[in-house]
Image (spheres, coloured by chain):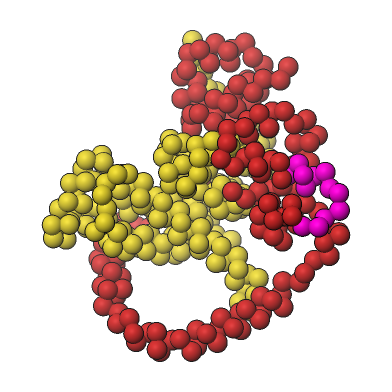
Amino acid sequence: MNCHKFEEELQKSSTLKAIEADAAFGEHLKACPVCQVARAEYTRLFDLLAADQPPLPDDAYWASFPALVRERIEKVHSRPRWKPVLGWSLPAAALIFVMGIALFVSKEKPNLANLTAEEAFNYTGTIEEAADLPLPENTLTSVAAQAEEELVGTLKVEELVYTLSEEQLKTLEEKLTDFKL
Amino acid sequence: MTAGEDRELVARFKSGDQAAFNQLVRLYQKRVYAVAFRMVRDEEEAKDLTQEVFVKMYTALADFRGEASLFTWAYRATVNLAINQIRRKKIISWVPLLEAEEKPAEPKEGLGERETARLKQAIAEAVKKLPPKQRAIFILRHYDELPNEEIAQIVGKSVGAVKANYFQALQKMKKYLAEWKSVLTSGVKAYELPS
């Protein structure tokens, strides 16, 4: 049995309670063991994520916050525009030059023949560019390129995710851990 | 706070009432900070980003026409600034001399809550592994419970891409936090099925 209704519901509603409040889906959930397993898994995940509360600064900080913003606004607005340009242009240019050299030296050109899809992807930054690299025949690259194409801006991702085999999905997930928008 | 109230405060500010801006800041400061922190996972950086959002808001209010809600604007500014920050940090870490060593966040809890602190750290590490825009979508959707349509406006993507990315992010988080599964197995609350 291969039911993805729970995942589909999850994409529509952000909370498990909202999903379960849907009477029609509730009926389905009662009868579908696959969705029950998915529900249990996401319940665990959501419970874990509930522990992640940001450490809020204390009340004294928030009381002074508008004043801090004001101070910063005044600084921005009172800054004479010509002065920093003259004063900082030379050191800034020198710094950019040094950083550029350092980046150039540190970013070694990889051997394209040995790149995996993920490495190519990381090297170029986008899957489209990665697909353009003169890589050897690599099924994974084309799968990844296809995935990216499908993912961006369309609703076809559901179809894609659900039509790939478990093995393809696993490989894709392992290699394409960081797909870019 | 409704869009109408937003507009009223903005109108007051535009007509010269500076107190209206302070009121907007107070209304949104904590929510902006929470999003900023979840994006950059660093308290000082999040404070700095939060201030920067309001500095930008101050300037942008002059042209604000109220087509979207002010908070959507603030979310967008926060997400964009945070993404820039994350990317800048990535670039800096390429330069060995300037490489910033990432310090694990200090657990705030006492000894009895050591496990919770470890879990928080694990979540922080997992969130950091998500690509910046996917991270933003995950945070806005999961923690702020914003509708897909609003998130799409904020991150400048289609609703379909938002849905897909949220789902992908959840899958990844499940994977990254797999070792914590057993910790909660016995303590998971039983969610009642609707009758």
Q: Residue at x 77, y 51 (%)?
A: A117
**Magenta includes A93?**
no
The picture quadrant where one finds residue B99 is: bottom right
Residue closer to the observer: A138 or B181: A138
The image shows residue B98 at horizontal and vertical percentages of: 61, 77
The image shows residue A72 at horizontal and vertical percentages of: 30, 70
The image shows residue B155 at horizontal and vertical percentages of: 47, 48
Can residue B95 be seen?
yes
Apparent colour of chain A = red
Residue closer to the observer: A151 or A49: A151
Q: Which residues are magenta?
A: A133-144
Q: Residue at x 21, y 52 (%)?
A: B10
Apparent colour of chain B = yellow
Residue A61 falls left or right of residue B132: left
The image shows residue A88 at horizontal and vertical percentages of: 44, 86
Q: Residue at x 66, y 58 (%)?
A: A125
Which quadrant: the N terminus of chain A?
Answer: top right
Residue closer to the observer: B36 or A64: B36
Question: How many numbered marks does the figure carry?
Answer: 0
The picture quadrant where one finds residue B153 is: top left
Residue closer to the observer: B41 or B153: B153
Can residue A63 be seen?
no
The picture quadrant where one finds residue A47 is: top right
Q: Residue at x 62, y 78 (%)?
A: A100
In the image, residue A31 sits, relative to residue A58, either above or below, namely: above
